[in-house]
Amino acid sequence: MLSEQFHKVFAGLTRAYGTYTIEDSSNIKIEGTAKTVSESYTSHLWELHLTGKIGLGVIPINDNNKCKWGCIDVDEYNLNLEELSKKFKRKNIIVCRSKSGGAHLFIFTKNFISAGLMIKKLKEICNILNFSKYDLFPRQDKILTERGDTGNWLNMPYFNGSETDRYAIYNGKAISPERFLQWVDKFSLNNLDDLNLGISEKVETSEDLLPKGPPCLQHLIKQGFPEGTRNNGLFNLGVYARKSNPDNWEDTLEDMNIKYMNPPLKPREFTTLLASLDKKDYNYKCNEQPIQAYCDRPRCLTCKFGINDDGQMPSLNGITKILTDPPCYFLTIGEKRIGPLKSEQIINFNFFKKVVFEHLNILLPKVAEKLWIETVNDLMAKLEEVTAPDDSSNKGRLWELLERFCTGSTASEVQEDLLRGKAVIKKELTEFRINDFMEFLERHRFKEFKLHEITAYLKNKGATHDSKKIKGKFTNVWQIPNFIKQQEEFTQPKIEKEAYE
């Protein structure tokens, strides 16, 4: 069955998957709602995906930090995908069209391999192809399974089967789902060392022309600066020239004017531009065209001659929000995963800097507050949300502890035991004193809510407050519908007679 074959080919994390619902397809970059679902990843999901009922996303890295496939997600929309697919002499790399018209470059292996090795190989490919905007999958070499981490997922090809616009391209031609599966079977690698890129025609690289420069300018010098943006474009190239060649930046910029501006700025305009750049306060005009459209702040921070003047940041490769109460976050830095983080540990750069130092032994450079706000906002625009079970939230844990208090060793059926700190189970209701429950919470180190918050929560759950006379004394009690009392199971061990003879 087709769905089972795709499920086998795109093996990944089995306890979670992604979904993507398109809301606006009028833009070049299709907009929609993405979420991560903490449920089993099964072949049935592929059946729904192939019939166009859900958009499926798969997390390539499993709980053993291994994977069977990797992908370069190229976020550029002016690529000729057919021509790109022809550049590989050896067909171990296949190009797929993404949902927004970009490129997904896949490689597959016959057996599970280290996610770290897969990332290393994907980086080698990127160094040759040198796309300006891209993401790697898997994004991290290790996921923090024991802390509830799930990693990041990629939208899958062949949404809606043969009627798809997310198809694979083999040697310049779109191929069917069945042919794609045949390709994977034929060209999956026994070993990553067997991958020979065999680029038949060297892809033009802007990195050689603008070493360690911002991704936006890397893209524009390859594509060309749009009409009406020459002055701003050359100004930003001037900022790069000042950062990369401070002693001879004017000559460098003059060469750039001739090479990259069509037509070049006239001498008077160029002299005015030099005067502007000669001022002390200068930086890239990230919020203006032509570079705004290609801005990638998280990646730009990692460039030596990017937006930060106080040193290079490691790359920030994605953020995941676990929908607990309160929410927590996992962040990928380079290929390393950190978390769970609280909101304030991301919002406040100094707190973030401390967390990174404690987790990864990396001392981050100083980042201006405004720049950090912009960077976090850019990251949050690509946020992946992960559903969480109820008991993973503070309220869920409070309810779990209440159930234990009302059904465990602290429970009784004798009314007078209420005065001894126990919960008393009656026919339909369980009664307890709030101070006894608060002491129980303290013994279990639950301090997330104050007394008034707990009583409000109890009322919301249908609990009522009453006063009754026990042993001649009025006592304030809370009443809540009975939980199902948990009976401890005891299995009599089988005693082998021979063991004693």
Image (cartoon, helix red, strand yellow):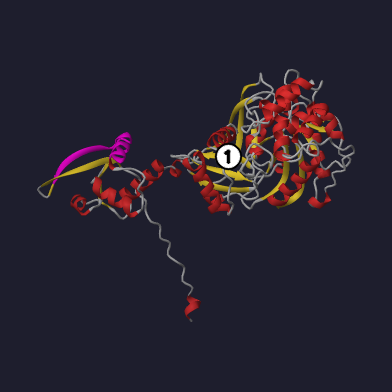
Q: Is residue 101 left or right of residue 83?
A: left
Say which of 144 and 377 sits in front.
377
Amino acid type for the residue under numbered disc 1: Ile
Task: Identify the secondary structure beneath mark 1.
Answer: strand
Give the residue displayed 58% in from the left and 54% down from the top: 361
Q: Dot 1, how many residues are within 10 Å of its Cα: few (below 14), some (14-19), or many (20+)?
A: many
Is 32 one of the magenta-colored residues?
Answer: no
Q: Is residue 126 left or right of residue 422?
A: right
Q: Which residue is mark 1?
A: 319
Q: Is residue 108 above or below residue 55?
A: below
Image quadrant containing the N terminus: top right
- Most extreme residue toward the bottom is 501
- Most extreme residue toward the left is 472
Residue 51 visible to the viewer: no
Say which of 396 and 220 sits in front.
220
Q: Position of residue 127 (x, y in %)?
A: 78, 43
Give the residue displayed 44% in from the left and 44% down from the top: 391
Q: Is residue 487 left or right of residue 155?
A: left
Q: Quadrant of residue 385?
A: top right
Q: Quadrant of residue 9?
A: top right
Say which of 48 and 93 sits in front.
93
Residue 249 visible to the viewer: yes
Q: Position of residue 434 (x, y in %)?
A: 25, 45
Q: Position of residue 12 (x, y in %)?
A: 66, 45
Q: Quadrant of residue 378?
A: top right
Give the residue displayed 76% in from the left and 41% down from the top: 126
Q: Is residue 492 left or right of residue 24?
A: left
Is 464 one of the magenta-colored residues?
Answer: yes
**Which residue range is magenta in the image?**
452-469
